[in-house]
Image (cartoon, rainbow, N blue to C red):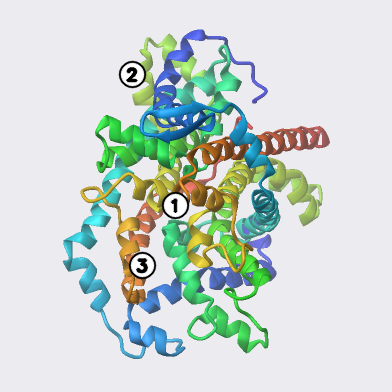
Amino acid sequence: MSVVVKPVNQKAWWLIVPVILCVAFSAIIPLMTVVNYSVQDIIGPGRAVFVGTEWFAEIMRNEDLLSALLRQLMFSMAVLLIEIPLGVLLALSMPERGWRASAVLVIVALSLLIPWNVVGTIWQIFGRTDIGLLGNLLVGLGLDYSYSGNPVQAWLTVLLMDVWHWTPLVALLAYAGLRAIPEAYYQAASIDGASKWAVFRYIQLPKMRGVLMIAVLLRFMDSFMIYTEPFVLTGGGPGSSTTFLSQFLTQMAVGQFDVGPAAAFSLIYFLIILLFCFLLYNWMMRVGTQDKGGER
Amino acid sequence: MSATRRWPRKRTLFLVCYLVFALLPIYWMVGMSFRTNQEILSNFTLFPHHFTLDSYRLILTDPSWYMGYVNSLIYVCINMVISIAVALPAAYAFSRYSFLGDRQVFFWLLTNRMTPPAVFLLPFFQFYTTLGLMDTHLAVALAHLLFNVPLAVWILEGFMSGIPREIDETAYIDGYSFPRFFLTIFLPLIKSGVGVAAFFCFMFSWVELLLARTLTSVNAKPIVAVMTRTVSASGMDWATLAAAGTLTIVPGAIVIWFVRHYIAKGFAMGRV
């Protein structure tokens, strides 16, 4: 929250009513359906039995799910650890103005605008060793590369695809944050004889905190919910090395039509994301306030 | 000029390397779209040998293909307009006033973005069938509000918090009503925020597949779903898929071209 004290005005609620209505329509009502399913066993049309927490217990005992969860966590952490620094570095390297800045912005944003199933398909052929550029390149370098045969390489390929796909989001946000820093800050720093690292650490990084918070949370949420791209690229294989949580869920809900357990799983899934976002949010808030203390 | 002084070669080199990395898969897609399927699958070549526009001709002459783009554009635009329209007043409320439960509501809004779309497939399907909205553009536009409204509120709130409160107060003293002040004074001040929020709404709605595919069948079928027909029993129609993919970049590239100045002008988020 900002430091400025805002006037208390309960009428402001009227201004957020439209948002609440919209989100209620597209989130609360469907979510209630999910909750409803999660505690019932649907035997046939119009016939359902209340089963309480049975589905939840069943889900928690499912070992495939636990390993999918572990895989998912590792994936999301790897995504954050690679994409956030890379995006910031990219933003620092992008030209500041002129036609070059425009051109670089558009090129960087391109990968964000490709539909997710196309991303998967393109990488599927891009990574093939017989006809794809990446596959050919890696084999040319003497690697025994195959994203469809080797579990580790499959996982790494999905990660590389995600880095290619989403680092631009971090870069665009960080770039916008950097451009908002007044020139006076840099002048003051150069008078003080600050090193490049000091400029980054004490001016640029704190000023980017707001946009980086958005970037970190968005990347965490979205990578945790990743579905289409690995589904198209590897189909979750080889084995189950790239079966992430949402794919697991979809298999359960649509493939096997286990509505009850799938709904219970959905709720647990949602709570996990919520928990991690809450932790990240609070952690970044705390780190941010310490930064402010350092500036004074 | 300090900008040029802070411009070491290392960074330019890094930038060029990244751009190459970013463009290679796109180059491969565009390259594939100019080839025949036979050439794509037979051998590895850096450039198309038999340059052909057949894939593009197919997409641009077959209504079931090009209507996919029209359908997608329709629901993306509806979604964008609704998202921004409801997010503007809410973001104003969050940035200017404190009221009962404001932080809680703000975080609750964000939590809606954390729900995996896969969770909502079945409930959405049933809900929109009951409402008779299945296979309409409105259904997809409304479903995509789920992840776009929270983001739009978040971004707009950041921009609004950067505008000094004195501007509001002066306007009210001058006798402006809230709607008149908001539309004639405040909105022009945050237009870059609106541009950036609109870009993000456009992007996330344009590329989403799961919900869009589930909620449509014929009349409102989006391009992302039309593309899945290139997968058939006889194998993939790679060239057509690549051409369709290349064409999907175009509208987004136009949108980013319009908002590039807003991004390059910079924004810092006030709230967080």
Real-space Cα distance between discs 3 and 2? 43 Å
Q: Are marks 1 and 3 in contact (CB under 8 Å)?
A: no
Considering only order in the chain, which callout, 2 or 3, is on the residue closer to the N terminus? 2
Which quarter of the picture shows residue A121? bottom left
From this viewpoint, is residue A87 visible? yes
- Same-subunit check for callouts 1 and 3: yes
Tell me the kind of residue under disc 2: Arg
Considering only order in the chain, which callout, 1 or 2, is on the residue closer to the N terminus? 2
Q: Secondary structure at mark 2?
A: helix
Q: Position of residue B183 (x, y in %)?
A: 34, 25
Real-space Cα distance between discs 1 and 3? 21 Å
Tell me the kind of residue under disc 1: Arg
Residue matched to label 2: B180
Relative to A59, does residue B240 appear above or below in the rendering? below
From this viewpoint, is residue B114 visible? no
Q: Position of residue A282 (x, y in %)?
A: 72, 33
State the residue in front, B215 or B199. B215
For the C terminus of chain B, give its image quadrant: top right
Residue matched to label 1: B260
